[in-house]
Image (cartoon, rainbow, N blue to C red):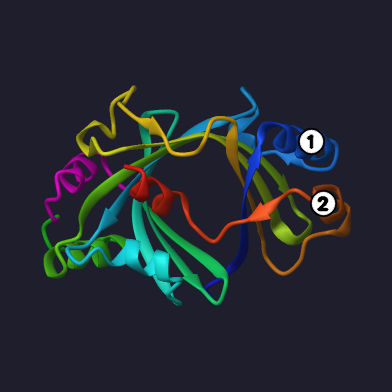
């Protein structure tokens, strides 16, 4: 199966803008099933960086293509631990992912490559190789609360991310609570729009706000700047 790259647009917005968009989208889109109980969930990601600081520099320069690795958990739980490789090319993104065991996660958190094995998923094999050849190691934790809206038409996903914070205490990644600091000015949040080939007009029209400003920088980059 061919890899499927998706469009991804990001905006920095204030609470009023986020509330207006949420009010408009609620009747048109569904809340993601993983957030239906509380309406939102917490995402915590541990990003990796190599010896040469390549990921940060490529993001700053807008290098195309580029990629970065992260380990992700939800709501501070270790029940589901994923290793993700996020690629960006020609303005589109592709995410590859595989599950990690708790033991594998703890080793990678310490910057220790796993024993070489052909049984690993290709994503884990690639990270393992880069940890040995480019000294790739855990760099920064990115933590935020997400309200996710989804729509089958165009496979659209709109996410409202509040309380975006960073932490340099990578050893605390799996702790229920971690030391962290906000990386955006008070009252500022991030809105993300992801889709395959098109956004339905009834969604696009309701997201029109003259005050929205698109940003090219990722949460990883912003957290690295203000760590």
Q: Is residue 106 above or below residue 93?
A: above
Report which quarter residue 77 is drawn in: top left
Judge by depth and name the residue closer to the eye, 222 or 201.
222
The residue drawn where x is 87% and y is 53% is 205
At 45% from the left edge and 77% from the top edge, which residue is drawn? 64
Q: Is residue 123 above or below residue 44?
A: below
- Residue appearing at x 21%, y 62% in the figure: 50
| Disc 2 target residue | 208
Q: CA distance from mark 2 to mark 1?
A: 10 Å
Whole-percent x, y for residue 57 in the image? 33, 66
Indicate whether 46 appears above or below 200: above
Examine the structure image and report whether residue 112 is included in the region drawn in magenta. yes
Q: Nearer the viewer, residue 201 or 219?
A: 219
Quadrant in the rendering for residue 124:
bottom left
Which element carries disc 1, helix, strand or loop?
helix
Give the camera-side residue of 159 and 120: 159
In the picture, the quarter occupied by the C terminus is: top left
User: Does the magenta segment cover residue 79?
Assistant: no
Residue drawn at the location 76% of the way across and 66% of the way down: 198
> Circle 2 — which element?
loop
**Residue 101 locus on image (x, y percent):** 27, 43
Q: Which residue is mark 1?
A: 20
Can residue 82 be seen from the camera position used here?
no
Sort mark 2 into few (<14), some (14-19) or many (20+) by Cα contacts within 10 Å.
Answer: few
Q: Earlier in the sequence, mark 2 or mark 1?
A: 1
How far across and down, in percent of the image, does residue 40 sit? 60, 30
Give, as a single range, the part of the protein colored magenta: 99-113
Going by the image, does 96 lie left or right of 185? Answer: left
**Mark 1 surroundings: few (<14), some (14-19) or many (≥20) residues within 10 A:** few
């Amino acid at each position: 199966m061919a890899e499927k790259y998706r469009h991804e647009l990001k905006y920095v917005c204030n609470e009023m803008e986020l509330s207006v968009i949420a009010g408009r989208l609620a009747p048109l889109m569904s809340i993601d099933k993983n957030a239906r109980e509380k309406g939102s969930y917490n995402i915590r990601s541990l990003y990796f960086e190599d010896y040469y600081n390549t990921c940060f520099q490529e993001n700053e320069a807008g290098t195309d293509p580029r990629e970065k690795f992260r380990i992700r958990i939800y709501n501070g739980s270790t029940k589901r631990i994923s290793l993700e490789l996020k690629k960006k090319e020609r303005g589109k993104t592709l995410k590859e992912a595989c599950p990690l065991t708790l033991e594998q996660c703890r080793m990678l958190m310490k910057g220790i490559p796993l024993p070489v094995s052909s049984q690993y998923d290709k994503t884990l094999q690639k990270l393992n190789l880069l940890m040995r050849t480019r000294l790739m190691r855990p760099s920064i934790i990115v933590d935020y609360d997400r309200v996710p809206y989804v729509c089958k038409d165009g496979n659209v996903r709109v996410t409202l991310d509040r309380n975006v914070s960073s932490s340099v205490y990578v050893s605390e990644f799996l702790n229920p609570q971690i030391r962290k600091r906000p990386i955006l000015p008070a009252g500022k949040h991030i809105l993300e729009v992801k889709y395959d080939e098109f956004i339905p007009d009834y969604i696009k029209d309701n997201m029109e706000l003259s005050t929205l400003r698109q940003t090219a920088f990722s949460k990883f980059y912003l957290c690295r700047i203000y760590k």
